[in-house]
Amino acid sequence: MPSGYGGDGDPDALYRPGRRDLLKLLGVGAAAGLAGCSSSGNQSEEAGASATTTARSGGSTTDYVSASSVDASSLNWISIADATSGGFIGLTMDATWVITPEQEIFPLWADISTDDGRVYEVQLRENLRWGAGYGQMTADDWVYMIQEVFQDPDNWSGYPNADDWVRNGEPIPVEKTGDRSFTLSLPEVDPSFPFKPVLWGQNCMPQGILEKYAPSGDVEGLRQDEEVNTLAYTGNLGPYSYERWDRESQFVVTRNDEYYMRELAQNGDLDFAGIDGVDQSFAEAWTEAPTFDRRIVRVIKEESARLGALRNGDVTTAGVPPNKANQFQDLEDVYLNVTPQPFVSVLAYNQRANGWRPFRRKAVRQALGHAVDKQAIAESIYRGYAQVAQTMQPKWTKWYVDDQITNYGVGENYGPEVTRRLLAEALSGTEYSYDGDVLKNGAGEQVTLSLYFDQGQDTERTTAEFIAQEFQKNAGIRVEIRPTSSFIEKFATNSPPEGTEAEWTAGQFNGGPRDVSTSPEPWDMSVNLGFNTYPYTPTSSSAFFQERGGINYYGYVPERDIVGLYEEASRTVDEEERRRLLGQAFGYINEEQPFGFVTMTSAISGYRSEVVGPIEDFASGWDSQTWYFE
């Protein structure tokens, strides 16, 4: 029986060989309790849904409206790295697979299997159809995209996750094995590969679009492509179809009557056998999916306006800041969902040429780690809906090792004396020195740094204000806080000056060496982007700690071989040894302080009470296509 066929020989029933062996290799059981993470990072408005087979109120025909504080940056998913853009696109396209609350792979477009933890086969569903005349989704689409876009040595498209497709300096071999199947051959065993964001949650684009631009590396052509910018190619691949995008106002999609999952469910071809926590009767939930006529994302920048819209029923869901959660706890019309999430809030330091140069010194970053009272942020600003963060992993996961960690900003590692003493030592031999309690530059002026936060995010503003006060009080540094509604475009995106060619590039968020590639506008610090810690597969965060990493917009150059430890841990089957290696890696990250770790927060979302589906779990959103109004 060839791989990709079910036990009854039906090619529509995805065969799932090696699933139990895969989980055993991974060291994860169905009830392991290890927190997961959202593939898109969209942890608020798109939070999860529980399996249900209840009748859908006669097939409710209503609008589901989400409130967002910021607009998307692009609908070209190949070049984006922000959760908002991913959330817009995700309404029109599913992806390969998602992870259930029981930490099982739930196939959407595809399933994955392995016999040895090294060679993995991906099997696509048969009824996947592109729009705009591109026909059936096939293995050719995937192989072409992987080889000509993701693995292109020059990364012509600016794909931010290109590093995921390279092992030991070489592209991961990919081979077509059938019209709807292909294999990836890893150089070494990697038992956690299916749970990594290499293919988990991965989108695709038709070969017919990509081959117009890949041969010549025409990134501008891809950016301006009409079919890309209107998502015309998404066909039956997602629950909704693109209607319009009114910039800075709203994004609107309509129910996709040709949705492939509904088609499979109605034909009796959905097979969930062998997936823990998912009963075969769950297929009934997909026979009407999606249940809403339209999904609308409204851009409402002001926090008070977003919360007012939720309270008044003008939107279905909105994120709720911790300091406002108590206002909704007793409302009958609103359900408050508090969901653990894997994103760490950081104080990013711009170590590129248009930032404060001393940030490049590890000792300076370490000294500044003593300047901010993290416990006060977690308890007072986040009202207890957060924990202090010290490295690239939540303290409650099994990968965190206490004896490798310095607890910056807590107890004896917080305050003016220790901060100024360490900062003075770190800046010895430079133009900077203390005049009393004030840090001054070579011109005798107080050091003044900028700190950016997202406009309309009151909690971010409060955090920024607190950090500014702490820097002044404990480090003698003046901080100017500045709101922005376009941080990604103006500050995170960077490139060499016009007419200058960098020796390498890792995409739009890391256009080259930090002395060459800079953002359009200068900046020193920011608190508006959180980073995914990937609790399922911690080594997936490696791009944050590589000089040539695709997300390294801040220009960090590591002193320790963090990525080397990640790679060794990734190919280690023995869980205790993997824990030791990861503990060492997280210790190095804590020591290097590539950015200031602040808090691990919970995602707090308010939903109108008639919404049926949200659950309080890391896997929130894994089956949100089946949500409905009661």
Image (cartoon, grey):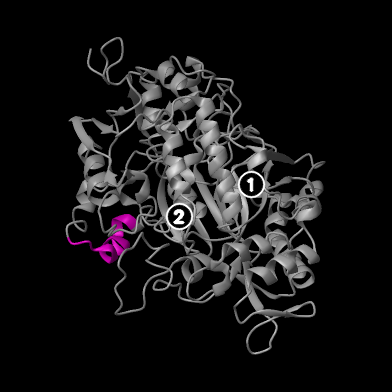
Whether residue 31 is visible, yes or no, is yes
Residue range of the region highlighted in magenta in the rendering: 216-228
Position of 340 compared to 497: left or right? right
Residue at image x 45%, y 26%?
Answer: 105
Q: Is disc 2 surrounded by few (<14), some (14 to 19) or many (20+) residues within 10 Å?
A: many
Q: Nearer the viewer, residue 614 or 533?
A: 533
- Taking 138 as reference, is 263 above or below it? above
Residue extending furthest top? 8
Asked if residue 219 lies in the magenta stretch, the reply is yes
Q: Secondary structure at mark 2?
A: loop
Q: Quadrant of residue 9?
A: top left
Q: Nearer the viewer, residue 183 or 392?
A: 392
Label the magenta part by its dominant secondary structure.
Answer: helix
Residue occupied by mark 2: 81
Q: Amino acid at mark 1?
A: Thr
Residue occupied by mark 1: 317
Position of 575 compared to 601: left or right? left
Picture disc at residue 345? none
Q: Amino acid at mark 2?
A: Ala
